[in-house]
Image: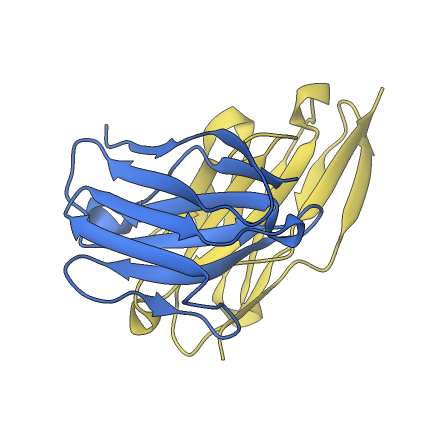
Chain colours: A yellow, B blue
Amino acid sequence: AQSVTQPDIHITVSEGASLELRCNYSYGATPYLFWYVQSPGQGLQLLLKYFSGDTLVQGIKGFEAEFKRSQSSFNLRKPSVHWSDAAEYFCAVMSMEYGNKLVFGAGTILRVKS
Amino acid sequence: GAVVSQHPSRVICKSGTSVKIECRSLDFQATTMFWYRQFPKQSLMLMATSNEGSKATYEQGVEKDKFLINHASLTLSTLTVTSAHPEDSSFYICSAPGTANTIYFGEGSWLTVV
């Protein structure tokens, strides 16, 4: 069965420090991969997505993610975190064999300390 | 670019009443739309797949008689929460696949049942 795992429920980093949010998936084939951000009381904003090609994907707000097939991972990174990045981040996976349904990870809450 | 609009963004209803949430694709046609629900401090869970011109497909554990989905046109899907109870209070969000496997989300609807 398809599944998405975000092992870290909460992460706290200092402003200006680097960030990596982990995401692992379990699928039969290479799925399409997404990272979304949700601020408190808000909807979802797409940060970046991977379908094929270059495994290092650049997104908005200075975020990037790297697809590693051997590890079934799609970790989100940012070299220098800003206080405004505090939010909840969701990794999501979609596979054509499952009818374009997005399956979300449990989310990681990012706290930024000054 | 393509936009999915969801209405209302916030609604408060009395226990036992029904409430309808609309999801519209504004400049593209969507034969399929997806409805998700997010309880506080939890991830987004797919409730059902809305299919234009046919019955919706519900995920396991979602009551189809309680969450009525209608997809009468290529640009509109509605979710009606019937006989709402306080435990139905949640964030409901729809999505529609666009071209090139892009997923567009609505802004979400906050439902509070009192």
Q: Quadrant of the C terminus of chain A?
A: top right
Q: Is residue A103 in view from this perspective?
A: no
Question: Residue A35: percent from the left, percent from the top?
Answer: 51, 45
Q: Residue at x 39, y 46 (%)?
A: B94
Q: Is residue B41 above or below residue A64?
A: below
A86 lies left or right of B80: right
Position of B44 with respect to B80 (left or right) is right
Q: Is residue B86 above or below residue B51?
A: above
Residue B42 relative to residue A25: left or right: right
The reply, left or right, for residue B55 in relation to residue B87 is: left
> Can residue B51 be seen in this snapshot?
yes
Q: Nearer the viewer, residue A36 or B16?
A: B16
Q: Quadrant of residue B13?
A: top right
Q: Which residue is outermost to the front? A: B16
- Name the spot of residue B12 as percent of width and height, x first: 57, 33
The residue at the point 42 percent across, 30 percent down is B8
